[in-house]
Image: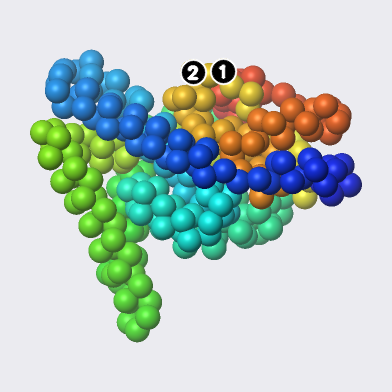
């Protein structure tokens, strides 16, 4: 397994690990601005075409919030830990039906156990490569809301069915925050005169977002060179996708997943520079290259 301390100088590490509030605010505010712009477009000009545009483009922005939650969970988005915790929870996690604290706790295990059979994310990618018919069934479940409804049911049950004590209080508290955040978003949209578009936001979250999230999971770890090798170069994938694909399904530099596993403390906005440095040092010479998500799908979804 590659040890980055042996390949990076102190100055290189310092530059890569440096966090920037300016970068963080830009990513957060531009993400929310695009969300409101898409909902405003559909709200002011309701038409099947504008609804379709929102349904296709909103998932990337919702995933963008999840990615920023992920960064905040690593404390790599903002300089201060408290700002990571507050922004990551209230402006990133809760709007997308996540919870920063529980996500971060499980994600630590993913990094620690990636490349082993104990990886908690293993069910998301273990079955690949799969045949086309099986993959089409997954896509159908995502786009018809079946996957989203399963997730939503789990959230509600988790908030209502704890046995008691602290677990009951925590579950109800989280569910209240989830509902309150959605109500606040609905109020903001209502104050803009487009309150009905909350249903477009939530419907997208339950359907097309589920497919985009699945594609992200596939791209990151499915059918890699060796899923049981602890070296991230063997068990994790980066996709050098074109700009339009990154905008639609890989926002906020989330496509640089191999680099993230090599050095999780690198903020997402410095991952391209990290990749360039790794290539310059020859550390990615034997790593398969993927230039787009269609190429990943051809590799992970096969005719037979």
At 34% across and 25% down in the image, what residue appears?
56
Query: Nearest the camera: 174 or 224?
Result: 174
Work out which quarter of the rendered image holds the C terminus and state it. top right
Query: Nearest the camera: 126 or 241?
Result: 241
Q: Position of 75 compared to 86: left or right?
A: right
* Quarter assignment of residue 288: top right
* Quarter assignment of residue 30: top left
Residue that lies at the very extreme toward the right in this rendered image? 6
Q: Position of residue 141 (x, y in %)?
A: 36, 37
Determine which residue is flagged by label 1: 242
Query: Nearest the camera: 116 or 21?
Result: 21
Marks 2/1 in contact by CB < 8 Å: the verdict is yes
Determine which residue is flagged by label 2: 244
Q: Position of residue 230 (x, y in %)?
A: 77, 50
Q: Residues within 10 Å of mark 2 (few under 14, many from 20)?
A: few
Q: Does 272 sit above or below residue 16?
A: above
């Amino acid at each position: 397994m590659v040890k980055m301390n042996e390949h990076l100088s102190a100055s290189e590490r310092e530059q890569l690990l440096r966090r920037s509030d300016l970068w963080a605010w830009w990513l957060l505010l531009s993400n929310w601005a695009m969300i409101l712009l898409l909902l405003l477009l559909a709200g002011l000009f309701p038409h099947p075409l504008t609804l379709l545009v929102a349904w296709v483009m909103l998932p990337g922005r919702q995933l963008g919030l999840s990615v920023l939650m992920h960064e905040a969970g690593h404390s790599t988005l903002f300089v201060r830990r408290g700002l990571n915790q507050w922004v990551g929870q209230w402006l990133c996690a809760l709007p997308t039906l996540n919870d920063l604290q529980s996500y971060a706790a499980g994600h630590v295990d993913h990094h620690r156990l990636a490349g082993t059979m104990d990886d908690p994310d293993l069910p998301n990618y273990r079955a690949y490569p799969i045949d086309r018919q099986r993959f089409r069934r997954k896509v159908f479940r995502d786009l018809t809301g079946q996957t989203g409804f399963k997730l939503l049911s789990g959230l509600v049950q988790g908030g209502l069915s704890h046995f008691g004590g602290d677990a009951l209080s925590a579950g109800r508290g989280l569910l209240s925050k989830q509902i309150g955040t959605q109500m606040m978003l609905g109020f903001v949209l209502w104050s803009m005169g487009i309150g009905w578009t909350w249903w477009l936001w939530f419907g997208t979250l339950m359907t097309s977002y589920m497919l985009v999230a699945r594609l992200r999971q596939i791209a990151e770890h499915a059918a890699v060179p060796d899923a049981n090798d602890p070296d991230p170069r063997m068990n994790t994938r980066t996709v050098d996708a074109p700009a339009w694909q990154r905008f639609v399904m890989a926002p906020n530099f989330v496509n640089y997943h191999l680099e993230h596993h090599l050095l999780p403390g690198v903020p997402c906005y410095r991952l391209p520079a990290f990749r360039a440095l790794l290539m310059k040092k020859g550390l990615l010479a034997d790593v398969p290259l993927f230039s787009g998500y269609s190429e990943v799908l051809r590799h992970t979804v096969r005719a037979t």
